[in-house]
Image (spheres, rainbow, N blue to C red):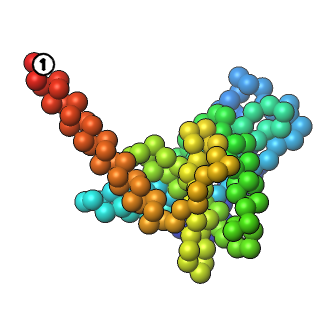
Amino acid sequence: MADTTTQPPHSEKEILARVISVFADLDLGKSPRSTVKSLPLFRMAWNKDEPVVTRLGWRYLVVIHSRDSFVVDALSTGDSGFRFLFRRGAGEAWQQAIQRLNRRAQVKARSDEPRCLDVPAVHRSYIWLASSTGGDLLINIHDHGQVSQRARLRNLQEVQREAQLALEGKVQAFARMKEAVESRS
């Protein structure tokens, strides 16, 4: 079941406490300041060759100043609960990417909802500026949250097409690799 809440179900304090607990060996509790930014989290997958975008939960970008940063994904379990996935090192980069994106002229005049879109089939993530009037904009985020200064903004259809092509390329490469292995047997 997809998460449909419009407000993050976890407070900044609760998420920060979870990060400090999970990464207890880093002694993060002594840091004087921290920031937590929450974004709705979506995933693109394929159902019979058709891309389907589903709301999964929330992505929390946690920066513990002068120490470290983290990404915490709160994935809806369907029973009003959440399962948490923690990653170290990308929270600050994601926040900086969102700030850089908001400084672009074509984005400044808009009032969009920032979201995260993961496309695990092709190992890509996007910042998704969802517009209530249509014309959503997406920008690819590299492995650890970096965004290129010259990265081109895309619409959702372009992202779906690019992901479909990348997925087809992977399937073809896998088929060729399988043929090569079988021919050696």
Q: Is residue 14 left or right of residue 59?
A: right
Q: Quadrant of residue 138?
A: bottom right
Q: Quadrant of residue 34?
A: top right
Closer to the camera, 110 or 19? 110
The percent position of residue 40, horizontal first and vertical second, equals 59, 60
Looking at numbered disc 1 in the image, what kind of residue is underneath it? Arg
> Is residue 116 visible to us here?
no
Closer to the camera, 112 or 65? 112
Quarter of the image with the N terminus in it: bottom left
Residue for point 66% across, 70% down = 112
Quarter of the image with the C terminus in it: top left
Name above or below for residue 156 compared with residue 98. Answer: below
Q: Residues within 10 Å of mark 1 (few under 14, many from 20)?
A: few
Name above or below for residue 112 compared with residue 70. Answer: below
The percent position of residue 90, horizontal first and vertical second, equals 65, 39
Q: Secondary structure at mark 1?
A: helix
Which residue is the extreme one toward the right? 32
Q: Which residue is mark 1?
A: 184
The percent position of residue 136, horizontal first and vertical second, equals 56, 70
> Is residue 161 visible to us here?
yes
Residue for point 53% across, 49% down = 125
Name above or below for residue 133 compared with residue 44. Answer: below
Closer to the camera, 62 or 44? 44
What count of labels does the image hold? Answer: 1
Q: Is residue 114 left or right of residue 52?
A: right
Name above or below for residue 181 compared with residue 101. Answer: above
Q: Quadrant of residue 98?
A: bottom right
Residue for point 68% across, 29% down = 23
Which residue is the extreme one toward the bottom? 133
Which residue is the extreme one toward the front? 150
Residue for point 40% across, 53% down = 163
